[in-house]
Image (cartoon, rainbow, N blue to C red):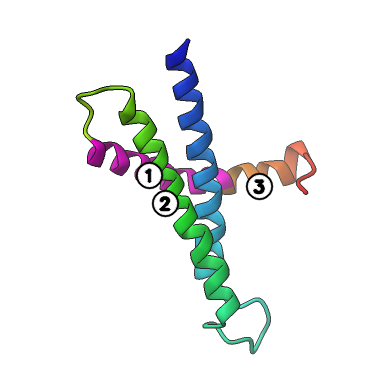
Amino acid sequence: MQGRFVLTIRLLLLASASIALYCGFGELLLVPHAPGEPYWAKERFLYGVIPLVLGFTIATIAGWVGVAKSPDGDFVSSVGRHYRFAVCGVPAVFLFLCLNDLVFHIPIP
């Protein structure tokens, strides 16, 4: 039972890390919102960096939770693996948002 609980916590942490990375990468990498708006605006940089750092921090916590259960686990490889999972989850978040808009129509506040 405790193994399933740890797995559920890790999956929830990875999902929230993917959502934060989606928001951070989207705000940092997309073109300005309006024509003539400067790209390097302070708000754009701030609203992109905070979710990006938060996403990588949450992925680090998920890696720590995964290693905390086993005494012979490698922390560095676990965190690297969770970083890859979180970054691969960014397109999954985009795909879910597209499917929600086209098929499911679940209201997102």
Q: Secondary structure at mark 3?
A: helix
Q: Which residue position holds label 1?
A: 60
The crowd level at tag 2 (other Cα within 10 Å; few <14, some 14-19, many 20+) is many
The amino acid type found where label 1 is placed reads: Thr
Q: Looking at the picture, how far across and down is residue 34, in whole percent?
A: 68, 81
Q: Secondary structure at mark 2?
A: helix
Q: Looking at the picture, how far across and down is residue 29, in whole percent?
A: 50, 69
Q: Is residue 55 magenta?
A: no
The answer to whether residue 25 is above or below residue 89 is below
The crowd level at tag 1 (other Cα within 10 Å; few <14, some 14-19, many 20+) is many
Q: Which residue position holds label 3?
A: 98
Left or right of 109, for residue 32? left
Q: Secondary structure at mark 1?
A: helix
Question: Which residue lies at the image location 80% right of the left edge and 43% below the top edge?
Answer: 107
Which circle, 2 or 3, is nearer the viewer?
A: 2
Q: Looking at the picture, how far across and down is residue 91, in whole percent?
A: 51, 48
The answer to whether residue 53 is above or below residue 6 is below
**How many angstroms separate mark 2 from mark 1 (CA)?**
6 Å
